[in-house]
Image (tube, helix red, strand yellow):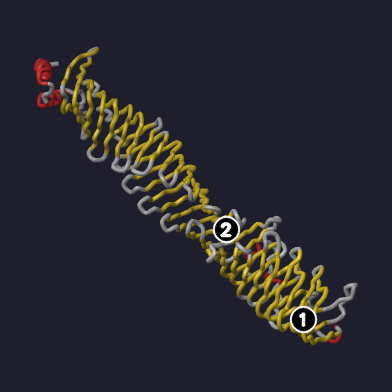
Amino acid sequence: MNLLLHNIIISTQKILNKTRGCLLLLLVVSHTYAQNTPNDSVKVIDIYNADMLTGYNVKGKSFQKLVGKVVLHHEGAMMFCDSAIISDQDNLARAYGHIHIQQGDSLDLYGEEMEYDGNKRIAILKKKVRLIDKQITLNSEQITYDRNAGLAYYSDSSSTITQNDQLTSKKGYYYISKKEFAFKGDVVLKNSEYTLYSDTMIYNTVTDVTYFKGPSTIVSPQSYIYCENGWYDKPNDRAQFNKNAYVIAENNILKGDSLYYERQKGYGRAIGNVSIEDTVENVTVYGQYAETQRNIERYLVTDSAQMVQVFDIGDTLFMHADTLLAIQDTMDRRVLNCFHHVKFYKSDMQGACDSLTYTQADSLLRMFYKPVIWNEENQVTAEHIIVNIGKSKIYWMEMLTTALIISQEDSVMFNQIGGDIMKGYFKDNNLSRVDVFGSGKTIYFPKEDDGTIIGMNIVDCIDITILIEAKTIEKIIFKKKPEGVLWPLEKVNPADYKLDGFEWLIHRRPKNRWEIFSRS
């Protein structure tokens, strides 16, 4: 060290001891050290202020001790503290008490202890550390601030607080230029509306958008949400959940490859392997695309749409349509509307029509536009059919306008019951009785006890009751003004005798649950 430099140091120490701070001379000292730094590309830590400065040497290294209202500066960062020790050769500062690092308007860091490496541009803050962004405050016992990478991070748990949220995690990173936090390991976010648990959560303080990755759950009084990838846009109150995602809301469970939700509107959208389950009614609707309203109380499902209802006895109803639309009626009961190419399969009953309404509360199927139902040996058609399917069995069926029941004896002989209005009753899920109201007509083939067909009986009558046993007509009761004739088979061609509206539709009958998707 040259004589001039030595004299400047001695003079500076004397003046500081008398005046407790001389900013001008401190700047001179700082500037002189900068000129004598071994590597001119590395800038030394500048001393802007201190109430007292003391210089000393330890094992050949020179140090400066600063006390009281210490202000340091290094390449655009201001550092405030109660006291500090600067190692000249190492360009290293150790600071203590009320530490504050200020990086323009982008970052404020607070703590009780700090080690700052001017060569590496890295600060390590300890004890009651706080990182403050305009939107969030991060609390930890230790935070490392890497100015080269524009990154502040912790690795031993921390908590963050905003105006409405509180978050804890094992690790965390703050990317200064992007103003983005990344929290990892046992992430828990709590506020008054919900609690989020995640493996990884990324939060951008500018956009106020949160991204979560890995197994994540969002729990609130209204719903339970699970996914393994997703995001939440807080300003617009909308979110998307991906990968094994599902939502449980009241008695409904919504699943899909991708779930999108707008909370204020109560609107949701699901894409890919969609299912909506009603756990009370044991009803699940499947499809590849769905839209929901009012937290899944209302929904529309398309693309391979299918409804599956499991009954108490273990039997199951499978129903397909181009579109399934669930709404609430005036009594707040769910009604499922099925549009176009409707088919359903149950082990003891199958059906097809163009549109159908299913009321879950009373288990009524209302079928429209060329409806047809098959029960064992019987085919039922009418302009409008209503079926009461209970929790464990079929109770009754109403056929309105041009009603017709057909059963096949052989390729040309068909038992037929026709009328304007008919009602059928079931026993053990088999049609056991049919009442025809008003004008009715029957064509049937009575048999001997050994099963030999006697002939062809044609009867017109007002009000008819047909009793069916063992899947065959056991008895017909003609109530008012019956007119009929029994023809020997050798005198008639049964193929010529068909009631109005007759159409044998066996090719449309689904033989199993998978054939409900057939367009035949």
Q: Residue at x 46, y 57 (%)?
A: 268
Residue 235 % position (x, y)? 35, 52
Q: On the image, which quarter does residue 134 sit in?
A: top left
Q: Residue placed farthest to the right in the image?
A: 450
Is 480 above or below relative to 254?
below
To which residue does mark 2 refer? 286
Is 325 above or below relative to 418?
above
Residue 162 % position (x, y)? 34, 42
Q: How many marks?
A: 2
Q: Quadrant of the C terminus?
A: bottom right
The local secondary structure at tag 1 comes to strand
How would you rate the neighbour count of disc 1 (Cα within 10 Å): few for under 14, some for 14-19, many for 20 or more? many
Q: Amino acid at mark 1?
A: Thr
Residue 407 % position (x, y)? 76, 74
Q: On the image, which quarter does residue 311 sit in?
A: bottom right
How would you rate the neighbour count of disc 2 (Cα within 10 Å): few for under 14, some for 14-19, many for 20 or more? many
User: Would residue 269 appear left or right of 377 to someone viewing this image?
Assistant: left
Q: Does the image show residue 291?
A: yes
Is 190 above or below relative to 452?
above
Q: Residue at x 61, y 68 (%)?
A: 342
Q: Does the image show residue 496?
A: no
- Looking at the rendered image, the disc whose residue lies closer to the viewer, 2 or 1, is 1
User: Would residue 303 appear left or right of 237 to someone viewing this image?
Assistant: right
Closer-to-camera residue (70/432)? 432
Q: On the image, which quarter does residue 191 sit in?
A: top left
To which residue does mark 1 refer? 442
Q: Residue at x 48, y 43 (%)?
A: 216
